[in-house]
Amino acid sequence: MNTGAVIEITALSKDYHGLRPLRIEKLTIGARDLVAIVGLDQPMAETFVNLVTGATLPDRGEVNLFGRPTAAITDSTEWLSVVDRFGIVSERAVLLDALSVIQNLAIPFTLDIDPLAGDVRERAVLLAREVGLLETEWLRCVSELDAGGRTRIRLARALALDPSALLLEHANAGLPADAAAVLGADVRRIASNRGCALVALTAAPEFAAAAAPRVLTLDPASGRLSERRGNWSLFKRGE
């Protein structure tokens, strides 16, 4: 076991009622590693996120988080302390469409959002700026935003509590290729600046290359992860 790793997976198999179980032969994510994984569809990506946050256990193999196996987590308090170290960007994260962007970004800090206290609003504004939400959007209802704006709100919410690792679950889904490339580059910059680990799960190799310097492709039959060599032209244009 690598005690310095954020995530360490060995000989994992998990049945999620797909065509075949999710298999991962070996994966180690260090504290500042930026990694994208291609080859997981959305149900498989959801299963992966649940496994690496300890929400579910593998059928076989082992998942270690911060040097501790998820099977050793014994109660909800301990599990929540682990989950709080991850920021998850997923469509499963609920947004409150009737509230403004800033109100949605304040929710990780307080439920007293009408009106917002000055210090809470400032924290929400900092998050909005960090993820590239325009000031003209801050007071708009979330329901008025396009898919890219909603994804950036989820990204900001994932960053709110200063996670040790970011998990992206098909964050580029529904975005045009150019917008996805910009989002990937922004995610990469933010994770690098914060010094947190990143695991971006996607079906799009171009988004993967924009989001992370290390791109792995999963062979779902064997569970082997192979590293992509060379450059992707879309990433080079975005860079």
Image (cartoon, grey):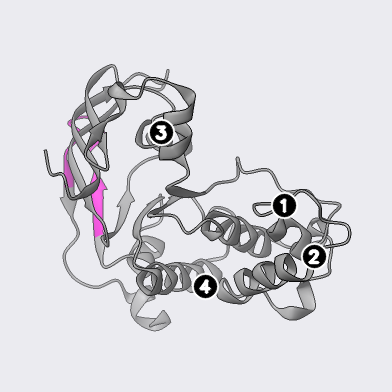
Question: Is residue 128 found left or right of 182 in the rendered image?
Answer: right
In front of the other: 212 or 7? 7
Q: Residue 113: horizontal and vertical position, in percent?
A: 82, 56
**Which residues lie in the magenta part?**
215-225
Give the number of the mark in front: 4 or 2. Answer: 2
- Depth check: give the residue in front, 219 or 86: 86
Residue 174 shows in the view:
yes
Residue 165, position as x, y percentages in the image: 38, 53
Q: Disc 3 designates what residue?
A: 44
Q: CA distance from mark 1 to mark 4?
A: 35 Å
User: In the image, is residue 167 above or below residue 33?
Assistant: above
- Nearer-N-terminus badge (1/2): 1
Residue under numbered circle 2: 117
Contact between labelled residues 2 and 1, with CB atoms less than 8 Å apart: yes
Distance Cα–Cα, label 3 vs label 2:
40 Å
At x 38%, y 30%, the residue is 54
Residue matched to label 1: 110
41 or 153: nearer the viewer: 153
Name the residue tied to disc 4: 178
Pointer 4 with pointer 3, Cβ within 8 A: no
**10 Å crowding of disc 2: few (<14), some (14-19), many (20+):** few
Is the residue marked by circle 4 packed among few (<14), some (14-19), or many (20+) residues within 10 Å? some
Q: Is residue 6 left or right of residue 145?
A: left
Identify the residue shown where x is 38% and y is 83%.
239
Q: Is residue 139 above or below residue 44?
A: below
Category of crowding for the residue at label 3, using alpha-carbon neighbours closer than 10 angstroms: few (below 14), some (14–19), many (at least 20): many
Q: Could you tell me the amino acid type at mark 3?
A: Met
